[in-house]
Amino acid sequence: MIELEVKISERPASEQHTLKINVAHRPLPALKDIERSLGYFDYPTRSRTVDLSIDEHPCYASLGAVDDFTDELLSWAYDRQCECDPLNKPYYLDCLEELAKGRGSSDLEMKVVMATSAGEYGLKAIEDAYKYLGLDPKTKEGDDHIMGLYKSRIESAPRQKDEAKNCLLIIAKARNSEKIEALANDKTMSLDEALEFLGVSSDTPSDSIEASAVAIVRFTPLGVISKPRISDFIIGLRSRQGKGRSRSPYHCQSTPW
């Protein structure tokens, strides 16, 4: 009976007067008490106005949030979801990116950039990485098969090596594969790649090649890393030139460029 009277009391006053309805019980709303008990009464919101005619984006529910969350609260909700459900981090990152774009939030967009820089990837990035190597994202192929496709790709299209390597790193992260990650992080260069890096050709005299290498050591930060090993590379080039400039590739195994 009380529930019925509550429903009647929600009708417009003019309607109640016309029907001569007299509601005996008018219970006090408990919503604020409930909110206080749950610890979210009067939490900071980005707007006090709620448009009930617009459906809330489903990504809010995926992050355990609501539309009126501030950017700071939404960022916190993303972190908590990732902490509690790490296997679905890629999906949560996609949700955060989608909401950042929809809200036009530079803070949330920066959050996405920082997560990506830290090695996190969304589902779309993972799917694109698999497709780049001609694989279905749900493939059951083993690591060796994927590594073989990568090697075949960079052998047939060496100028795509950087892009292929980035895709391989994403796949390694998604599969939690140390083997694939090791291949993606392999810095070994072929002779042609090393010549291109130094800005010389196979016909360049060895003294000029050495001068180019020394210049890189002296004037670039990368040279600081390469300096202890660069002599090995120069020796290899000289040895190759002494053998009549054979076209077979020389791998600079000790040069981590």
Image (cartoon, rainbow, N blue to C red):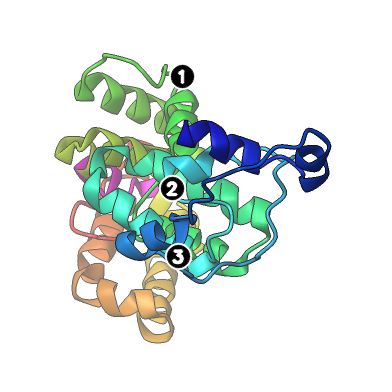
| Residue at disc 3, secondary structure | helix
Residue 167 located left or right of residue 52: left
> Which sits earlier in the primary sequence, circle 2 or circle 3?
3
Residue 81 located left or right of residue 62: left
Closest to the observer, 218 or 55: 55
Closest to the observer, 181 or 233: 181
Q: Amino acid at mark 3?
A: Leu
- Estimate how packed mark 3 is, as few (under 14), some (14 to 19) or many (20 or more) residues with alpha carbons within 10 Å: some
In percent of width and height, residue 100 lies at 59, 56
Residue under the point 30% across and 36% down: 174
Disc 2 + disc 3, Cβ < 8 Å: no
Any part of residue 66 in sight: yes
Q: Which mark is residue 134?
A: 1
Q: Amino acid at mark 2?
A: Leu
On the image, numbered disc 3 is attached to which residue? 73
Q: Amino acid at mark 1?
A: Gly
Closer to the eye: label 2 or 3: 3
> Which sits earlier in the primary sequence, circle 1 or circle 2?
2
Answer with the quarter of the image where residue 161 lies: top left
Q: Identify the magenta region.
A: 182-192
Closest to the observer, 98 or 138: 98
In percent of width and height, residue 14 lies at 83, 44
Closest to the observer, 43 or 235: 43
Q: CA distance from mark 2 to mark 3?
A: 15 Å
On the image, numbered disc 2 is attached to which residue? 93
Residue under the point 66% across and 37% down: 55
In percent of width and height, residue 140 lies at 26, 14
> Which sits earlier in the primary sequence, circle 1 or circle 3?
3
